[in-house]
Image (cartoon, rainbow, N blue to C red):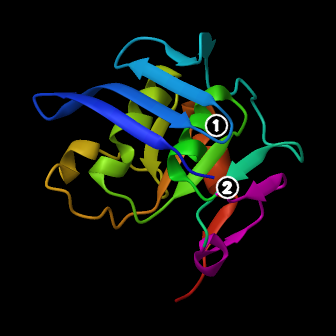
């Protein structure tokens, strides 16, 4: 799975995010601080209060090399970080664990996720600020994209393996 993302920047900050997946025809878009959309339909992160065996966690390809997971639902890698973030924004997935990204990778989908009510955290639950990476450096921290109300629960299912 792949797609094209586009961010409109104002004073080095993304104010519009667009992500298009040609294979599915899905177009996601949002203005910062406003509503997020999938085509013409408004989207929101999942309102699910608890993680169940029907929940979906999207991950990066080497997730199982880094984490032991007790996540009771399905764990999938679709191969595209922006798609993962947009699926969290639509409520199709409860969370996504992402790694090895840059400011450019996250500028557009971040606008969409936040407009849909989601948030990006460091996997340890601490605050993540995308503006710390304006210089283009790779983001070393693994990140968790999730609805804020279930962040702690999702984190409780993730345990880093010993390196």
Residue 17 relative to residue 14: left or right = right
Instruction: Using the image, determine if residue 14 lies above or below residue 64.
Output: above
Q: Name the residue under label 1.
A: 87
Find residue 92 and report its horizontal and vertical position in percent.
73, 34
Indicate the secondary structure of the residue bearing disc 1: helix
Instruction: Using the image, determine if residue 37 lies above or below residue 50.
Output: above
Say which residue appears at 28% left-offset and 50% top-offset.
103
Q: What stretch is highlighted in magenta?
A: 62-78
What is the crowding at mark 2: few (fewer than 14 residues within 10 Å), some, or many (at least 20)? few
The residues tagged by marks 2 and 1 sit, at their Cα atoms, a distance apart of: 10 Å
Q: Name the residue under label 2.
A: 78
Q: Foreground: 8 or 115?
A: 8
Residue 147 sits in which quadrant?
Answer: top right
Residue 142 sits in which quadrant?
Answer: bottom left
Find residue 67 and report its horizontal and vertical position in percent.
63, 73
Residue 56 belongs to the span the image colors magenta: no
Indicate the secondary structure of the residue bearing disc 2: loop
Say which residue appears at 64% left-offset and 31% top-offset.
25
Instruction: Using the image, determine if residue 114 lies above or below residue 163.
Output: above
Outermost bottom residue = 163
Sequence-wise, the earlier of marks 2 and 1 is 2
Q: Which mark is residue 163?
A: none
């Amino acid at each position: 799975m792949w797609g094209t993302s586009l961010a409109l920047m104002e004073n080095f900050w993304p104010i519009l995010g667009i992500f298009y997946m040609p294979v599915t025809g899905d177009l996601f878009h949002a203005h910062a601080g406003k509503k997020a959309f999938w085509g013409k339909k408004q989207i929101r992160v999942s309102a699910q209060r608890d993680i169940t065996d029907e929940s979906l966690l999207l991950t990066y390809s080497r997730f199982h090399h880094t984490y032991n997971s007790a996540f009771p639902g399905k764990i999938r890698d679709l191969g595209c970080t922006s798609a993962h973030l947009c699926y969290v924004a639509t409520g199709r997935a409860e969370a996504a664990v992402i790694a090895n990204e840059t400011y450019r990778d996250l500028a557009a989908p971040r606008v969409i996720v936040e407009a849909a009510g989601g948030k990006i955290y460091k996997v340890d639950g601490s605050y993540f600020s995308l503006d710390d990476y304006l210089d283009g450096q790779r983001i070393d921290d693994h990140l968790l994209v999730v609805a804020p109300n279930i962040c702690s629960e999702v984190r409780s299912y993730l345990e880093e393996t010993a390196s």
